[in-house]
Structures are given as structure tokens and as C-alpha cells.
Image (cartoon, grey):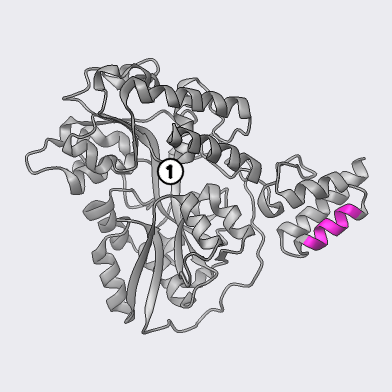
Amino acid sequence: MQKDDLAAGRILAALRHGRVSRREALNALTATGLSAAAFHLLGGTAWADAAGQAIGPGGIPLARPNRPVKLPVFRDPIKSGLKPETGGTFNIFNYAEYVDKKLLDAFAKKYDVAVKVTTFDSMDQAITKLSTKAVRNMDVTNIISSRLAQAVAGKLVQPINKDYIPNLAKNCWPQFQSPFYDVDAQYTIPYTIYTTGIGWRSDKVSEDIHKMDNPWSIFWHSEKYKGYVSVLDDSREALALPMLYRGQYDMNTEDPKVIDKALEDLLALVPLCNVKVNITGYQTLPEGTCWLGHNWSGNMLSGVFAYMPKDGDPTQLQYWCAPRGKGPIQNDMWAVCSSAKKPVLAHLWLNFLLDEDNAYHNFIDFNGYQPPQNAITPESLVANKLIPDNLRTAIMTPEDLGSDSLQEAALTNDGLKLWQNAYARFNAG
């Protein structure tokens, strides 16, 4: 049995590094007599390699902060020294209102190209549209770590040539030179980093959530704020909320019982507080249509930077997030699409976003989501009165990341369906 395990491990390693095709790997696994392993690999369901690491879509191990994964490369990056494409349209696939229009215009002017942004509402929708070719000829896409392996397995994104992206090594936190989900940064560059926590208005919510024994429990004691409570419209984040409330810190569980319990707790919020489901806390909290929200740290800062009414008081906005290992921390990133018609320009877009000045002003002047750049620190932002001291908790440092950090990471196909189906039932209920 040990000999068979080693053989299977070698086959899967060859698949991960692109030395054999998926079909060749399946045939080789079957030839060793491991037909069950071949079946699981074909289905993309949970299995393990010789080291015991769970396998996800395309035979790629499921990356975790304490188990980094080097993704397979199915084609060579573009060659160095190529001239950028000019004329026509450069196509960006992204969330709405996630890059400052001034930055888009500056890039268009610098490289003599029209820039078009096609938007999606969720990462589920983005992956579906890319894989079904509902959107075509996208040059770059925003993406998250939990869906990157799926995008690589589906050949939706292509390897990058970092010769075109010197700002990655020059300006970004060390962790992003080789992140756990993309060892050696073969496919991605970081864009923003954020925690998931609780945002509220201190003039409307009487509890001091910072001092509660279990701050997550506030949502299940929010009857008096009925109609003014929200949870994030995201299949992973929404279901993670009741898990954290129950002290369940495995944000990547594929246990149906845990997921069903989370759904039950989430559904309880509907009659309790008439919970709203959205990702617009950056607007609803400052304008007062939400008083208590399950929120991303970037939404809180964006609310101050761009959406606070002229007569609003930013000191009334509060944000709590759990300490490292007890609450989610995530980052969004950019990748070059396999469908890119302007791949050189796509690389230059990635480098443009990582320019220290561009990253700073996109953050401060527009979206409020912190880029993981060395020059941006909580101390400097507060000292320069760019961030009110009450929202210092919304700013991160490199120390917030590590092998023990809590991150929503890749799932098997079956696991992803469990989460998505449960979330669909919540929306339907």
C-alpha cells in the first residue's frame, strides 16, 4: 500500500506541475490499481495526495496558510521585452466601483488605449461568466484566493512574467512575493487586504461591541434594530458568520452538519431582525439606513472617504474584528486572463496598480480598501488625519498574516457546492 501511495503521489505531482495531462494522470492512476483515486480525481472531490493533503479541482491540492501550494503551469508566460499593445479597448473584469475612475483614465492616457470595465456582483458570478464565456476577451480579472486554483484548473487565467511587474517586489508586503495560495506568485499580484468584522453606528447601537465576550452574538440579539441589520452578500462570508458565533473556526469545513447548522442560525435572523443582505455597507452605514452590519474593513474606510454625508460624523462609525486566528482576513488580487488580447498591457496594468502613488490614492481618494504596501501604516494614516482614530481597527499590518491566520481558502467541488447550495437556500428563505 505504501508503494502505491508513493506512485500516486508522483503522478499527482506530475499533474500539478503540468508534466502530464489530467487524462494521462487518470490513466496512470488506474494502471496502478487505484481506480477509486482515479474516480475521485475525475470528480474533483476530496482526496489526498501522498502527503495527506486534500485535492481540489484539476487535481490541485487545497492551499492553506500552513500548507502552501505551487500551482501547475499549463503554458509559458509571455516573453520579456515585448512592446505594449496600443489602440482598441483594454477589458477589465471587476467588481463595480472598485478602481478609481481617475486611475482608469490615467492608464488609458498613458498607454493610448480605451479602457472598459465589465462588472460582476460576486466571485461566484465572475468564475461562472469566465468559464462559460458569458464574457469574452477579458484582459485582466479581479480574483480571490479561494477561487484561484479553480481558475487555474479551468485555464481561465495565465501565468505572469514578473519582468513587467517590478513594483511587486519593490512595494508590497513580503508575504505576497510568494503567497500560500500561489507559491512564487506565478499567477497573481495583490490588490487589497481586508478583515471581516462588525461595523456599527455608536449613535444607534447601545452595546459596546468591542467589550462583548462574544461580539458575533450581537446579530442574534438585535431585535431592537430590526430593519437596520445587514449581513454580507457572499456565500462564504455569510455562512462563516454563524460559525464564528458558535466558536467554529474552520472556515473551510466541508462537513454538511456544520454547514446546515450555520444555515439554520442564519435563517433565524430573518424574523428576528429582518436582516438585509448586501455588500454596500460603505454607503448604508454612513447614510444611516444600516445601524449594525456584518462588514469588511474596507467598507468602513470607504464610508468615511467617499460616502459620509457632509453633515455626518465619522467618529460615530465603529469597527470590530477578531484577533488573528479568530476572524477572517482575506485579500483580493489581479490576474491576467487566458483570453487576453492585450497580454503585455495586462501585465503593465498589474504593475500600474502596484505603483506606490497609484495604490495610495486609489485607497485614500476612492475605494477605502487597503493595499498591502510597505509605505502604508496605521500610524501614518491616523497621524495624517486620513483615518479617524476610531477606525484604526480597520487597518492591517503584515503581522496580521501568518500560518495561523484564518482565511477562507479553496474547497473541493463538492465542498463548494455545499456552501453555495446552503447560501441559495438562505436567499430563498
**228 relative to 330 in the view: left or right:** left
The residue at the point 17 percent across, 38 percent down is 287
Q: What x and y, as percent, mark residue 264?
A: 49, 23
**13 relative to 338 in the view: left or right:** right
* Residue 414 versus residue 109 in the image, above or below: above
**429 relative to 317 in the view: left or right:** right
Q: Residue furthest left?
A: 311
Region in magenta: 23-30
Q: Amino acid at mark 1?
A: Pro
Can you tell which quarter of the image residue 209 is in?
top left
Density class for disc 1 (Cα within 10 Å; few <14, some 14-19, many ≥20) is: some
Q: What x and y, as percent, mark residue 260?
A: 56, 27
For the C terminus, the image quarter is top left
Q: Secondary structure at mark 1?
A: helix
* Residue 417 versus residue 78 in the image, above or below: above
Question: Is residue 309 on the magenta stretch?
Answer: no
For the N terminus, the image quarter is top right
The residue at the point 76 percent across, 55 percent down is 13
- Mark yes or no: residue 328 visible: no
- Return the residue at label 1: 398
Q: What x and y, as percent, mark residue 164?
A: 47, 72
